[in-house]
């Protein structure tokens, strides 16, 4: 009996080829470039979708995705700073909740 023939090494597994350099999607989505691209896609606040994920919510509020993640941590009183729905490991946010979270007190009030 002869030994099974081995397939030639693929170009990606050979040592003379460098490993492919890909940017993880989470890092790409956390970049300011990606957030600016979303604002070009949806230029007005009323154009944004009614439900958003962490990265879209961060772009909408113009904050870091880590800020959004910290806001959904349940505090000792059993409430999160930012209302959300969790579906498995994915968080979803309503645009109205994001507007309430990102509102600065007195921002829309008029001084007379």
Image: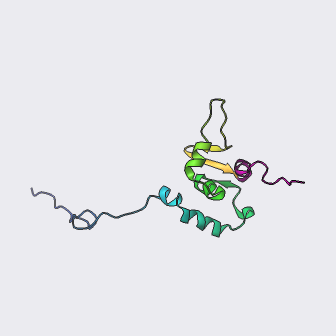
Most extreme residue toward the top is 76
The colour scheme is: rainbow
Q: Is residue 11 above or below residue 68?
A: below
Q: Is residue 107 magenta?
A: yes
Rendered location of residue 102, percent (x, y)? 70, 51
Number of dots carrying numbers: 0
Quadrant of the drawing holding the N terminus: bottom left
Q: Residue furthest right?
A: 112
- Viewer-closest of 48 and 86: 48
> Which residue is at 59% across, 67% downward?
37
Q: What percent of the width, then of the height, locates residue 11?
A: 26, 68
Residue bounds of the magenta highlight: 95-112
**Residue 98 part of the magenta-drawn span:** yes
Q: Quadrant of the C terminus?
A: bottom right
Q: Residue at x 79, y 50 (%)?
A: 106
Horizontally, residue 24 falls left or right of residue 74, namely left
Instruction: Give left or right: position of 97 versus 32.
Output: right
Q: Is residue 74 left or right of residue 25?
A: right
The residue drawn where x is 43% and y is 61% is: 23
> Going by the picture, which residue comes out furthest to the left?
1
| Quadrant of the image occupied by residue 18 | bottom left
Q: Is residue 69 above or below residue 13?
A: above
Horizontal and vertical percent position of residue 86: 61, 43
**For the point 48% across and 57% down, which residue is it?**
27
- Residue at the extreme front of the image, as rendered: 112
């Amino acid at each position: 009996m002869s030994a099974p023939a081995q397939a030639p090494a693929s170009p990606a597994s050979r040592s003379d080829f460098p490993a492919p350099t890909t940017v993880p999607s989470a890092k790409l989505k956390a970049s300011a470039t990606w957030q600016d691209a979303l604002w070009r896609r949806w230029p007005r606040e009323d154009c944004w979708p009614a439900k958003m994920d962490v990265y879209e919510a961060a772009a909408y509020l113009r904050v870091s995705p880590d800020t959004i993640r910290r806001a959904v941590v349940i505090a000792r009183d059993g409430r999160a700073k930012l209302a959300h729905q969790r579906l498995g490991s994915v968080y979803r946010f309503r645009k109205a909740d994001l507007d309430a979270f990102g509102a600065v007190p007195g921002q829309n009030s008029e001084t007379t």
